[in-house]
Structures are given as structure tokens and as C-alpha cells.
Image (spheres, rainbow, N blue to C red):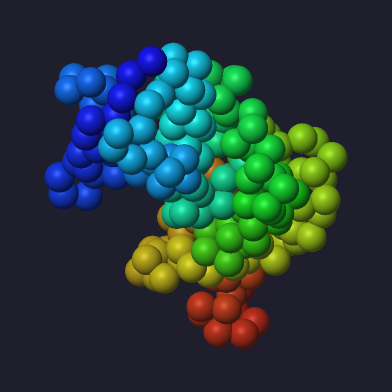
């Protein structure tokens, strides 16, 4: 049993509160835990209560780390687990946090897969195959991936990707244009047939209407 003799909040942006028992520093807690538990000076804490407070603090730290990670963009459940594991949280601490976030809809692999596919299509088009590979690397289940990538049209995506790249290749002759643009589309996972069609179509569009590729 110990009596709280001081509660000292960290300086600056720190959200940690140092707990002093019987005049000596004992441990620190997140400020939200201190407020939620109603801790104040002259309050007595048993060893069992201290253990519960420390566990609650660990949970709060894990939740805060998770929400910060999710604030930049949606994440897959696997990504979040890896992140929290690297931050030093064990499974016993992570599971309740991840379950809570899933219930709130903040972690949703199906929504994440749709977001990933749509984002790629809008800003960095690539093939259905490569998008599938990327999502698998994110830990998404195959059946969830299949639903997300089903809307990708490789022909349309290849043309869109080729069109954005072609502006920097305008001064090349057809052979160099075809080689450089073809390599670019291949890196984005498009098959030879699809990329060849996209390259020829973009070349024709740039040169005007029905003009034919220049060949020797």
C-alpha cells in the first residue's frame, strides 16, 4: 500500500504523468488514464491497483500508437499488427485494441483493399495482377483481394498509365518511344499484349488520328 504524494505532468507536449508514492517516484501513466481513474494526491494505492493501472496504461499507449498510425491513411490489419509489434506491444495488449478498432470500422481489410485499388487506379495505374500482389503483401486474404481488383480493366489502366508517361517521351522516335514506354508499363505489371496495344494507341494519339508508327 502506498499513498500518492504528487502527480507531475511532463513538460511540453508530453501526455505522461509521473506518480509519486510516499514521496518517491513510482511509475508514470498516460494523462487519459489518470483522468479516467480519478487519481489524486492523498489517495492510497494497493499493489493490485497499481498493477491494474499499469495494464490500463499499456492498453492506452497501444491504442494511441494505433490511432496515430491510422491517421495518415487506411491500413490493413496485418500492417497494423506489424507496426504495433515493432513498437514493443505483445499480443495480449494488441488484441483488445485491434478488436476495438475493427468494431469502430477503423480497421477493415475489405475497405482497405478497395481503397488501395481505387487509389492506384486514380494516381498510379497498374495491372490487376500487380495490384493483387501488392495487396497480398499487405496481408489481405485472397477472397477479399479478388473482390477489390475485379473492377480493374487492364486495357484502360495501361492506356492511362502510358498517357501520363508519354509526355516525357515526346521527342523520341517510335522505336525508342516503344521501348521506353513498354518497359515502364511492364514494371507496372501489364502483359505484353496489353502494353503493346497501349503504346501504339498513345503513339497514334500523339501523332494525330490515323498516323502509323514510323518503321524502317
Q: Is residue 181 visible?
A: yes
Q: Position of residue 159 (x, y in %)?
A: 62, 66
Q: Position of residue 151 (x, y in %)?
A: 79, 60
Residue at x 64% of width, y 57% of height:
115
Q: Nearer the viewer, residue 67 or 57?
A: 57
Q: Is residue 21 left or right of residue 119?
A: left
Q: Residue at x 83, y 50 (%)?
A: 147
Residue 154 image point, x, y percent: 72, 57
Left or right: where 139 falls relative to 36: right
Judge whether 148 appears above or below 15 on screen: below
Q: Quadrant of residue 208?
A: bottom right
What residue is drawn where x is 69% and y is 53%?
105
Residue 96 rendering spot, x and y as whole percentages: 64, 32
Residue 5 vs residue 52, the one in the foreground: 5
Q: Which of the two residues, 44 or 72, is positioned nearer the viewer here?
A: 44
Q: Is residue 191 above or below residue 210?
A: above
Image quadrant for the N terminus? top left
Residue 137 seen in render: no
Residue in view at x 53 percent, y 19 percent: 90
From the viewer's side, name the closer residue of 62 and 46: 46
Residue extending furthest toward the left: 11
How many numbered discs, if any?
0
Amino acid at each position: 500500500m502506498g499513498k500518492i504524494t504528487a502527480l507531475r505532468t511532463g513538460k511540453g507536449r508530453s501526455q505522461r504523468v509521473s506518480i509519486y508514492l510516499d514521496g518517491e517516484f513510482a511509475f508514470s501513466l498516460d494523462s487519459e488514464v489518470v483522468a479516467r481513474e480519478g487519481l489524486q494526491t492523498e489517495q492510497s494505492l494497493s499493489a493490485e491497483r497499481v498493477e491494474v493501472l499499469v495494464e490500463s496504461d499499456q492498453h492506452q499507449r497501444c491504442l494511441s500508437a494505433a490511432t496515430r498510425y491510422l491517421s495518415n491513411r487506411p491500413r490493413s490489419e496485418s500492417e497494423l499488427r506489424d507496426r504495433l509489434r515493432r513498437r514493443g506491444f505483445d499480443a495480449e495488449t494488441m488484441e483488445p485494441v485491434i478488436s476495438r478498432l475493427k468494431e469502430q470500422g477503423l480497421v477493415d481489410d475489405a475497405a482497405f483493399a478497395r481503397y488501395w485499388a481505387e487509389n492506384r487506379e486514380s494516381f498510379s495505374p497498374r495491372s490487376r495482377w500487380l495490384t493483387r500482389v501488392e495487396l497480398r503483401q499487405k496481408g489481405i486474404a485472397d477472397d477479399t483481394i479478388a473482390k477489390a481488383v475485379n473492377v480493374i480493366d487492364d486495357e484502360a489502366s495501361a492506356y492511362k498509365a502510358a498517357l501520363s508517361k508519354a509526355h516525357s517521351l515526346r521527342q523520341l522516335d517510335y522505336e525508342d518511344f516503344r521501348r521506353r514506354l513498354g518497359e515502364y508499363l511492364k514494371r507496372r505489371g501489364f502483359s505484353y499484349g496489353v502494353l503493346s496495344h497501349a503504346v501504339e494507341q498513345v503513339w497514334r494519339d500523339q501523332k494525330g488520328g490515323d498516323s502509323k508508327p514510323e518503321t524502317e
